[in-house]
Amino acid sequence: MSPGPASSAEANRWLVLAVVCAALLVVVIDATVLHVAAPSISEDLRPSAVELLWIIDGYSLVVAPLLVGFAKLGDKVGRPQVMLAGLAVFAAASLVAAFAPSPLVLIIGRALMGVGGAMIMPQTMSILRDVFPDRRERTTAVGIWVSVSSAGAAIGPIVGGFLVEHYWWGSVFLINIPILLAIAVATIAWLPPAAPRRRRRWTRSAWGS
């Protein structure tokens, strides 16, 4: 008998970890990537002080309140499916933001990126819980997930500074598209088509073997 989707994902669990960490890294980097691009954006689009604040921080303000709702949606309809939808939304919003002709369009693009990020981020952790049934391996995987999250926030300004210096401020968004496309292909290849729909509480037993 051939292994089911969940069994296949568990067999490729370290590849799955690489995929979800790559998706997480993109989401986290974009929370801080614009910090050094603000002068270039101000020079080009001439936003007001309030508009610039929304351009920089609107992404994080949208992500935070939507995380729980999209985590629940992933439990109901399938985590990889919600993650793929989030990748699509994030990529489309990145394209809008990259070529935004005005501060308002850039704010809208950043807000939509926040929606995509909120769809992606909780699925990355939930998928790890599904594909790492062994408690020791799951602890290692979660530790890597946390490290990637912390590293992404730290390297965001470095990535943004490099791109703005060598290209233009829109490149900090445009670079997301090929990366997200690669992640989407890997998600389809290595993650199960439908995640197990487990009603599990966030307790010690949920993390145990």
Image (cartoon, rainbow, N blue to C red):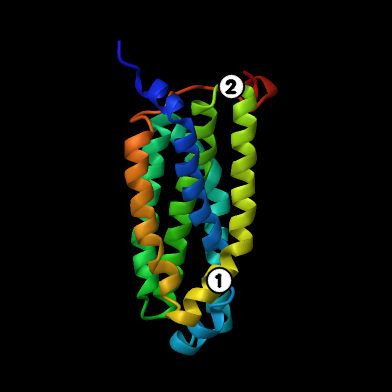
Give the camera-side residue of 122 and 115: 122
Compared with 85, 152 (above or below) is below
- Residue 163 location, x and y as percent? 47, 75
Q: Assign the N terminus to one quadrant of the image.
A: top left
Mark drawn on residue 56: 1
- Residue 2 location, x and y as percent? 30, 15
2 or 1: tag closer to the N-terminus: 1
Compared with 205, 91 (above or below) is below
Circle 1 packing at 10 Å, graded few (<14), some (14-19), many (20+), is: many
For residue 152, side relative to residue 185 (left or right): right
Compared with 75, 90 (above or below) is below
Q: Residue furthest top?
A: 1
Residue at which label 2 appears: 134
Mark 2 or 1: in front is 2
- Residue under the point 33% across and 60% down: 92
Q: Assign the C terminus to one quadrant of the image.
A: top right
Which amino acid, mark 1? Ile
Secondary structure state at the residue bearing disc 1: helix
For residue 163, side relative to residue 180 (left or right): right
For residue 33, side relative to residue 139 (left or right): left
Mark drawn on residue 179: none
Q: Is residue 47 visible?
A: no
- Residue 142 location, x and y as percent? 61, 37
Which amino acid, mark 2? Asp
For residue 137, side relative to residue 55 (left or right): right
Give the camera-side residue of 166 and 96: 166
Secondary structure state at the residue bearing disc 2: loop
